[in-house]
Amino acid sequence: MDYNGEIVKGSVEESGVLHLVLSRAPVNSAGESFFMEVGHYFEIAKHDPDVKAIVLSSTFPKYFSAGLDLKEAKLDKEGEDPARKAIRMRQHVLDWQEPISNIESCDKPVIVATAGIAYGLAVDICCAADIRYASSDTVFSIKEVDIGIAADIGTLSRLTKIIGNESLARELAYTARPFSAEEAVKMGFVSRTFASHEEVVQAALTTARIIASKSPVAVMGTKHLLNHARDHTTADSLSYTALWNAAMTQTEDVKQAFQAFLKKSKPRFSKL
């Protein structure tokens, strides 16, 4: 499938890794076309049997994303009825939430490799991803309060669940203060840091290739069950996991994995 648009450039390796690169000059600022294109390609990837894992990075070493494109954020209509404006604005926010949520709901694990400025939308994207890597020069900020709004694309819904520290999440959201890659590791927002843009992208691709070598049934199930566990009680999660694996352990992938283990060879799994 073709993953090359005006903003997102991508290709699928033979390994099954899809590398998507944000390429909106000069700083990957986000307007409607940015949101729609990102969401579109993650929806395609979800149903592409050739894709087993996804890496998302930026073509610009100093900017993962500078956040919202303020030139495209003028949403007022003169003389509009307040209730009708509220209805329209609500739908607008929902329409922009969906593309980022497509990252989370995509069946394939998503690794985000950040470098440089990662403000506003960049944090939303990271929160929706499975694995977050950063170059040592990455600077994050939940920037929305500085433009007079509450972050509404996903950070406030996801960040506390990721870092497990409500006090810190609130501090960052209320103040918009920048935080470094080093601090992001300490709080558990990113799992690893690397010296440069090139190194963080290569590390993300390496991890993605390892994931892509595993059973796609097992990987998809693992992501699905982890997301379910996050949003449900332990008892509900255990019950649901039992039901899920009652079906999914019937896959031929289990047989392939055992045979490969006994033969000390690499298993070959069918596409989803």
Image: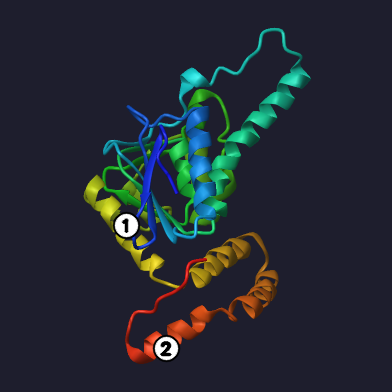
* Residue at 49% over, 48% down: 127
Q: Nearer the viewer, residue 152 or 15?
A: 15
Whether residue 167 is visible to the viewer of this picture, yes or no, is no
Q: Secondary structure at mark 1?
A: helix
Observer-side mark, 2 or 1, equals 2
* Residue at 22% over, 50% down: 195
* Residue at 41% over, 32% down: 6
The answer to whether residue 267 is above or below residue 50 is below
| Mark 2 nearby-residue class (10 Å; few <14, some 14–19, many ≥20) | some
Image quadrant of residue 75?
top right
Q: Nearer the viewer, residue 151 or 7?
A: 7
Determine the residue located farthest toward the top in the rendered image.
79
The answer to whether residue 44 is above or below residue 269 is above
The residue singled out by tag 2 in the image is 259
| Type of amino acid at the residue the image marks with label 1 | Leu
Looking at marks 2 and 1 on the same chain, the residue that comes earlier in the sequence is marked by: 1
Q: Secondary structure at mark 2?
A: helix
Q: Position of residue 47 (x, y in %)?
A: 54, 55
Q: Are marks 2 and 1 in contact (CB under 8 Å)?
A: no
Q: Nearer the viewer, residue 217 or 201?
A: 217
| Type of amino acid at the residue the image marks with label 2 | Gln
Q: As drawn, is 86 to the left or to the right of 135? A: right
* Residue at 58% over, 61% down: 227
Q: Position of residue 103 (x, y in %)?
A: 51, 49
Q: Position of residue 268 (x, y in %)?
A: 40, 76
Determine the residue located farthest toward the front in the rendered image.
1
| Mark 1 nearby-residue class (10 Å; few <14, some 14–19, many ≥20) | many
The residue singled out by tag 1 in the image is 205
Image quadrant of residue 57?
top left
Q: As drawn, is 12 to the left or to the right of 164? A: left
